[in-house]
Image (cartoon, coloured by chain):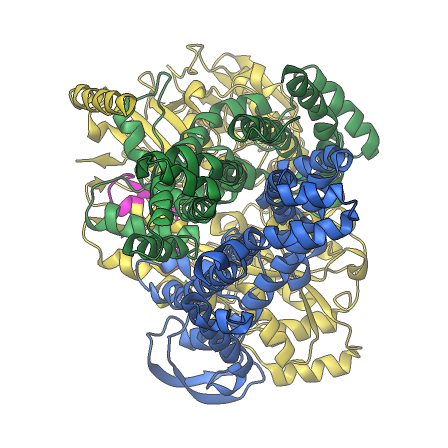
């Protein structure tokens, strides 16, 4: 039987997804050295330049540099290429942190709710209440109260996701509770924590991972929606989402402002999803039974 | 079963109370003053203070809450600061467009995604599986408004088959008929359902493929049942719980997509009402809408939970 | 399966039936207009919002109106006369004027409407300070008795922009100015279909068949008001890309304010054309908070005024060279009182001199709390430009980004910036609102009771009072220039440049009237 690493490596989705994500990570880290300028720098003389043009660009400190606008400039006079390169950083951070936060909180709540009836009643009512508040509304309100920075945006997007994760885990746990091996473990007086950890969690892993990748992907997209409504991260913190949201006014005329960041955002989100698919396929013991 | 339902329905009330309390306080403690929004650019601080007084916003918050609660119990959801109309009237006006959009999307998505996902799981590794995976993953990797703009560009601007924006009512005196109603909604449905087809198809594929590993499938096949029976009556039925859960969850997710879709396609629904209300700090509307959404979510979840009992007899309450 | 087939067949059948359905109004008699903002408040006296003002022009009429040359002409008034001592003004109404509910317009209605207007409007308030009593000797005659001669009677009664002295039935005008009216009945060329009004979605107007138009050709807001449509719909579309698509697809006939980014494309697109009903345009401004440091120090305000240059603002926020203009006057450069002789202000950024002045003034480096609205595309770029320019001159800027609702709430707070207050914000005004010392909000220098920023400058207030009494235009111009000089001396606020925002309409639409900034639906026709 192949080791876990070998099986991971063998899976096409995992290879592809991981490769793309590593590439994006690399680009984001290396952004300052990839021929970029300050992504927040605006020069009123370089508004709406076409892709590939080069010219003089005035930086905030007054100095002027010769710069090539590989992807053109936006309607503020900022270099789109620089913004897209730096945009990856925040977009990735938002995605990953939101998913981790939502999964940990939701996973714990879901397992508790699914396994213990008493906890179920109270916790699910609370989750119902939380989920009842429309996610967008909650996110906007939280951003308004806490201010628009990366930490608050992560919390604002993660919290509405927690009830959903909880529900999914709970529904799985409800089904798994009745599985023969779980009943057997209970009959053997195995401590609950052990049952949860050894029997329930591995079986919940696969759907949790699928859900987790969805959360990460949707976090990146939700951030774009918040920017679309004018309530996301301020533009001097470039994210692919808010670059697209700002560029949409000229979509018919200069689709580049929306399409270029999309060309980075879509593959990244795709890669996250594929990675999750692959991981689930490999980690799911039932799948392993079929293949290995 | 009935006691279960009644108990759950009663449990709704404390949820609504908690939600309304949370939202009420959050709104008043957050920055942003509805009086200042309404007063406009020409006003002075005195004007704004006067308006605040008229709105009752200078009262202590618990008192404001008590007053609002009393109103709600009597069936009065309040009066919009900004739009000068009763909240119930606003909601009534905007319910049809949002329901048309939301229900149509869910229906379309389920009808496409469940069969596709099941087939993909059945022939795992085949071209349908790969193709579906590719499409479904791409489907929810693109922001909703980008999909919307692309669809509008192709179908409304270039081909001119469908309208760019707007909503025509299905019922009532201003209705121009069913086809006019549908025509306005085709692009919005396609936009929103892209995400849901992707999501539901994935979960369907995952759950059905898991179900297909089960021993009872081998037994069913050994019994000589046709593949179709195996797929539908055994695999799909057992995979139903996660699928239904995700559809239920998907309805909850709908609001985010609905808000953007209603804005892009200028559909006068509850989504755009919510955004406007939040941006204008129209407290009564926000509070009323949150209450409404709470109620509908709880009812939908109740429906989903009840369906578990029907779908998976192992779950007993 | 079976159910689905039936449903499909039913749909198909319904489709075929609907194809033969009739339309009620011919296409060229319905006009679809996309206003620049959502029409939420319907009371044009309670609010100064431009969209509500425009709604007012649809359904109400005024005593006097401004024509294309800027002259005040009688509208509802047949004739008027002044007594020898200038203290008694008599107005006679035209015959046949009636409200939408059929009742005739009387002087009582006029008196009540004017009273309500004056309780809210700055210029109206100034006028009514002069008024001793309003008499209604006849149903069609109004007599205004003043305490002393007033130079601005006609200018006030013919005021074109917010708040406009619209005439309403006396029973509706009896509503206190601090409450919104509940009925929307006027005597104007259109009537408002309240039952079809969907806030946030559509507002519907129908032609007032009983409207008695003046016989002169329309000029600006004055003269006749020929209506060529049976039905006008104001369609609310929030997303600028959707507005763009809608006008191109012909789903709407006119978009009031297309975004500047779309300008070049719209100019070149077949099927639509650009025109301008507001050639006087708009002006951006930068406002200081005079109550708290550092801008309570006039030298530091002066330094900020020196640090910013108009060109960068209009280039960045508008970006279309033919639509912008530099203007050194606080009054729009196309207006009567414009005066570009401004030794105290160049409008060109001079960071070196600003830096010097800052040092001289003893700037302690404390950051300026600058407010930026993230969701208002019309002015959202201005603070970013200002930040760059101010920092280049040595200021420290703390850019607070928030949505408009948060901004207007914060703007009203008089607390120090660190405790929820502010130092600086930006906004834009229609030329009509700032072309006279009596209407411009920034010139409300009554200190704590004044406009946001709370400048306390009794000299400006004194000059404004003189202005209201000056009978000769030459004298008024002198006083206006004097006020301007004070504005620059005290750096009350900084004008950041002017721009026009042309409208876009389908090619088959003609007859757009040029007015003081109001898109009027009379005069327009569709082929």
Indicate whether residue B253 is drawn in magenta.
no
Which residue is at 32% across, 24% downward? C213
Vertical placement of residue A196 versus C327, above or below: above
- The quadrant holding residue B58 is top right
Q: Which corner quadrant of the image does residue C227 belong to?
A: top left
Viewer-closest of C447 and C407: C407
Picture residue at 42% right of the left edge, 15% below the top: C100
Q: Which chain appears yellow?
A: C
Q: Please state the total of marks drawn on the protein image.
A: 0
Q: For this view, does A141 lie left or right of residue B132?
A: right
| Magenta region, residue range | C246-260
For residue C33, say whether it is visible: yes
Instruction: Name the spot of residue A258 as percent of width and height, x first.
Output: 39, 63
Give the chain letter for blue: A
Quadrant in the picture for residue C48: top right
Colour of chain B, in one word, is green
Q: Nearer the viewer, residue C192 or B278?
A: B278
**Residue A196 in the figure: left or right of residue B218:** right
Depth check, front residue: B297 or C261: B297
Q: Nearer the viewer, residue C279 or C466?
A: C279
Above or below: residue C367 compared with residue C94: below
Coordinates of residue B37 in the picture (x, y in percent): 63, 42
Q: Where in the figure is residue B312, as x and y percent of width and height?
A: 54, 31
Can see residue C67? Answer: no
Could you tell me residue A74's position as x and y percent?
42, 69
Q: Is residue A132 left or right of residue A51?
A: right
């Amino acid at each position: 039987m192949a080791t876990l690493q070998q099986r991971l490596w063998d899976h096409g989705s995992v290879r592809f997804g991981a490769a793309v994500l590593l590439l994006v990570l690399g680009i984001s880290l290396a952004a300052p050295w990839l021929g970029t300028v300050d992504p927040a720098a605006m020069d009123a003389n370089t508004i709406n330049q076409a892709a590939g043009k080069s010219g003089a660009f005035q930086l905030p400190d007054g100095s002027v540099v010769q710069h090539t606008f590989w992807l053109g400039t936006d309607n503020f006079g900022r270099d789109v290429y620089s913004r897209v390169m730096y945009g990856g950083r925040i977009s990735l951070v938002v995605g990953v942190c939101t998913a981790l936060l939502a999964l940990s909180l939701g996973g714990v709540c879901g397992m508790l709710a699914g396994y213990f009836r008493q906890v179920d009643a109270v916790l699910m009512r609370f989750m119902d209440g939380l989920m009842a508040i429309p996610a967008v509304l909650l996110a906007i309100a939280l951003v308004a109260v806490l201010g628009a920075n990366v930490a608050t945006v992560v919390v604002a997007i993660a919290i509405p996701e927690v009830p959903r994760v909880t529900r999914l885990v709970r529904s799985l746990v409800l089904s798994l509770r009745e599985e023969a091996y779980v009943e057997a473990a209970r009959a053997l007086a195995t401590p609950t924590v052990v049952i949860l950890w050894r029997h329930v969690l591995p079986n919940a892993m696969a759907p949790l991972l699928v859900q987790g990748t969805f959360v990460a992907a949707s976090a990146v997209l939700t951030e774009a929606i918040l920017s679309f409504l004018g309530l996301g991260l301020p533009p001097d913190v470039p994210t692919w989402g808010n670059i697209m949201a700002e560029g949409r006014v000229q979509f018919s005329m200069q689709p580049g402002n929306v399409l270029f960041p999309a060309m980075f955002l879509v593959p990244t989100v795709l890669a996250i999803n594929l990675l999750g698919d692959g991981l689930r396929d490999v980690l799911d013991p039932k799948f392993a039974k079929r293949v290995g | 079963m009935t006691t279960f339902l009644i108990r759950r329905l009663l449990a709704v009330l404390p949820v609504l109370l908690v939600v309304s309390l949370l939202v009420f306080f959050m709104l008043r403690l957050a920055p942003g003053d509805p009086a200042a929004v309404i007063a406009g650019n020409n006003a002075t601080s005195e004007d704004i203070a006067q308006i605040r007084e008229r709105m009752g916003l200078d009262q202590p918050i618990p008192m404001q809450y008590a007053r609002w609660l009393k109103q709600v119990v009597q069936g009065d959801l309040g009066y919009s600061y900004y739009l000068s109309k009763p909240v119930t009237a606003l909601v009534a006006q905007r319910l049809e467009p949002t329901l048309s959009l939301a229900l149509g999307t869910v229906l379309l998505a389920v009808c496409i995604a469940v069969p596709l996902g099941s087939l993909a799981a059945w022939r795992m590794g085949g071209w349908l599986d790969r193709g579906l995976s590719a499409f479904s993953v791409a489907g929810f990797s693109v922001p909703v408004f980008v999909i919307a703009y692309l669809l509008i560009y192709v179908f409304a601007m270039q081909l001119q088959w469908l309208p760019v924006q707007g909503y025509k009512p299905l019922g009532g005196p201003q209705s121009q008929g069913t086809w006019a109603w549908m025509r306005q909604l085709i692009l919005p449905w396609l936009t929103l359902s892209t995400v849901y087809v992707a999501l539901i198809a994935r979960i369907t594929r995952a759950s059905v493929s898991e179900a297909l590993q089960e021993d009872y499938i081998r037994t069913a096949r050994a019994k000589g049942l046709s593949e179709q029976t195996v797929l539908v009556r055994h695999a799909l039925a057992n995979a139903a719980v996660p699928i239904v859960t995700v559809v239920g969850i998907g309805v909850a997710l709908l609001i985010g997509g609905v808000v953007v879709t209603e804005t892009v396609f200028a559909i006068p629904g509850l989504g755009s009402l919510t955004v406007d209300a939040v941006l204008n700090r129209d407290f009564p509307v926000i509070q009323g809408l949150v209450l409404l959404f709470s109620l509908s979510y709880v009812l939908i979840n109740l429906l989903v939970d009840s369906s578990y009992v029907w779908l998976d007899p192992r779950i007993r309450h | 399966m079976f159910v689905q087939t039936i449903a499909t067949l039913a749909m198909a059948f319904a489709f075929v039936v609907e194809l033969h359905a009739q339309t009620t109004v011919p296409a060229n008699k319905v006009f679809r207009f996309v206003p620049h903002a959502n029409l939420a408040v319907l009371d044009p006296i309670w609010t100064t919002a431009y969209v509500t003002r425009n709604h007012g022009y649809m359904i109400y009429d005024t005593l006097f109106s401004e024509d294309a040359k800027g002259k005040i002409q009688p509208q509802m008034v047949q004739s008027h006369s002044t007594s020898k001592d200038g203290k008694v003004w008599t107005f006679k109404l035209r015959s046949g004027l009636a409200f939408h509910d059929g009742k005739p317009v009387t002087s009582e209605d006029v008196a009540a409407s004017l009273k309500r207007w004056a309780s809210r409007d700055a210029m109206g308030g100034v006028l009514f300070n002069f008024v001793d009593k309003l008499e209604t000797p006849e149903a069609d005659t109004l007599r205004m008795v003043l305490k002393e001669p007033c130079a601005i009677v006609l200018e006030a009664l013919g005021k074109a922009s917010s708040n406009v002295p619209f005439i309403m039935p006396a029973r509706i005008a009896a509503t206190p100015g601090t409450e919104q009216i509940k009925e929307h009945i006027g005597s104007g060329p259109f009537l408002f279909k309240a039952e079809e009004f969907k806030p946030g979605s559509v507002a519907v107007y129908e032609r007032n068949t009983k409207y008695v138009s003046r016989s002169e050709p329309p000029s600006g807001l004055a003269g006749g008001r020929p209506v060529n449509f049976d039905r006008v719909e104001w369609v609310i579309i929030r997303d600028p890309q959707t507005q763009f698509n809608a006008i191109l697809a012909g789903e709407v006939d006119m978009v009031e304010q297309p975004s500047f980014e779309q300008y070049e494309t719209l100019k070149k697109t077949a099927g639509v054309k650009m025109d301008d009903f507001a050639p006087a345009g708009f002006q951006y401004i930068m406002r200081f908070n005079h109550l708290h440091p550092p801008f309570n120090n006039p030298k530091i305000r002066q330094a900020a005024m020196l640090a910013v240059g108009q060109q960068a603002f209009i280039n960045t926020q508008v970006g279309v060279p033919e639509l912008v203009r530099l203007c050194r006057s606080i009054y729009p450069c196309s207006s009567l009182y414009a005066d570009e002789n401004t030794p105290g202000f160049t409008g060109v950024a001079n960071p070196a001199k600003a830096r010097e002045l800052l040092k001289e003034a003893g700037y302690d480096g404390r950051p300026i709390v600058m407010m930026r609205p993230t969701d208002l595309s019309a002015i959202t770029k201005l603070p970013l430009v200002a930040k760059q320019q101010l920092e280049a001159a040595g200021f420290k800027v703390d850019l607070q980004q928030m949505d408009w609702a948060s901004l207007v709430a914060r703007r009203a707070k008089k607390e120090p910036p660190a405790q929820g207050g502010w130092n600086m914000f930006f906004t834009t005004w229609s030329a009509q609102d700032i072309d006279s010392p009596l209407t411009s909000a920034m010139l409300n220098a009554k200190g704590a009771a004044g406009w946001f920023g709370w400048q306390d400058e009794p000299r400006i207030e004194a000059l404004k009072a003189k202005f209201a009494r000056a009978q000769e235009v030459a004298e008024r111009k002198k006083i206006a220039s004097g006020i301007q000089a004070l504005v620059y001396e005290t750096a009350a606020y900084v004008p950041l440049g002017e721009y026009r925002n042309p409208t876009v309409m389908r090619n088959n639409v003609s007859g757009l009237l040029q007015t003081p900034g109001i898109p009027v639906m009379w005069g327009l026709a569709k082929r």
